[in-house]
Amino acid sequence: MSPAGKKLRSYDSAKIRTAVTAQFGHVARSAAELTPEQLERPSGLGDWTVAELAGHVAWIADSLAAGLARPPGAVPELRAAEWPFATASLAGKISEAARETLGGAPLPELFERAAGRLASALAEHPDGRVLDLWIGDMTLADFLVTRTVELVVHTDDLNRAVPGLGIPLERQALAACTRLLADALALKAPGGSVEVRIPPFAVVQCVQGPSHTRGTPPNVVETDPLTWLRLATGRTDWAGAVDGALVRASGERADLSALLPLMS
């Protein structure tokens, strides 16, 4: 849970709903154009093919609608920034559930069905609706923020797996994903000795030690949003990102390798 007195970031619910729907639509349109050869390519995620990864994205929307169709949970147990730490043990369960739900239907059919169910579910339920989830109950508003992480990260996975695919990243979805993962880092390593900058979306302070109040902090980490989400989810390792000048880290406490990834 969040440290006592720690105020967690709030999000504009209307923008998050729009971002989730838009990012899902971007993936759906691109997935419909994938060739059989592209669908059989390795995704870079374990033994999943591109077809299985795309199907998983359809499941993300379908499972949200299914969750809203179940009886509500009682009391929210998790906030958005706490979600990454609750997912580590569920990868196998999620993969199995996705395959059972999707049942081998053609991708266009899966995306069309999921999009319809998602739109209807979001129209029917308010932000405060509590979902009964495997990881712990969450409000719909907070859970939707976590969907930006799933959608943006897997959009990036698909783009890297299929050169030239070029699925757009919705700016608001990328912003929310970046901020959630930055806040999760601050929860994992509370403190004020390191400032992590991910322009233009997020700045957080973390890691115990001497804090600063004025001027440039002594320990600074700066990177771009895509590199950050790849670091936070284990797609890129810290040393490689630093060596490749994708991360600029200065100060004796600016090595975050022991804290990453936040989820994988």
Image (cartoon, grey):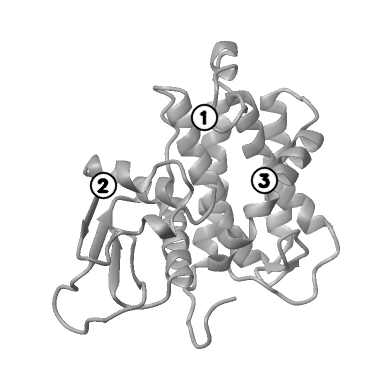
Q: Is residue 250 above or below residue 159?
A: below
Judging depth in this view, the residue of 175 and 83 nearest the camera is: 83
> Going from the N terminus, do you reach mark 3 or mark 1 first?
1
Q: Which mark is residue 91?
A: 3
- Secondary structure at numbered mark 2: helix
Compute the Cα span from label 2 to label 3: 28 Å
**Counting other residues with Cα less than 10 Å from the Cα at mark 2, is it few (<14), some (14-19), or many (20 or more)?**
some
From the viewer's perspective, tell me whether residue 226 is left or right of residue 157.
left
Query: How many labels were placed on the picture?
Result: 3
Label 1 amino acid? Gly
Q: Which mark is residue 165?
A: none
Residue 246, position as x, y percentages in the image:
26, 45
Residue 148, position as x, y percentages in the image:
53, 52
What residue is disc 2 on?
242
Judging depth in this view, the residue of 199 and 262 nearest the camera is: 262
Compute the Cα span from label 3 to label 1: 15 Å
**Counting other residues with Cα less than 10 Å from the Cα at mark 1, is it few (<14), some (14-19), or many (20 or more)?**
some
Residue extending furthest right? 71
Closer to viewer: mark 2 or mark 3:
2
**Counting other residues with Cα less than 10 Å from the Cα at mark 3, is it few (<14), some (14-19), or many (20 or more)?**
few
What residue is disc 1 on?
44
Residue under the image location 26 percent in, 81 percent down: 210
Residue extending furthest bottom? 5
Residue extending furthest top? 37
Residue 163, position as x, y percentages in the image:
41, 22
Compute the Cα span from label 1 to label 2: 22 Å
Residue under the image location 69 percent in, 50 percent down: 90
- Secondary structure at numbered mark 1: loop
Judging depth in this view, the residue of 129 and 45 nearest the camera is: 45
> Going from the N terminus, do you reach mark 1 or mark 2 first?
1
Residue under the image location 72 percent in, 66 percent down: 136
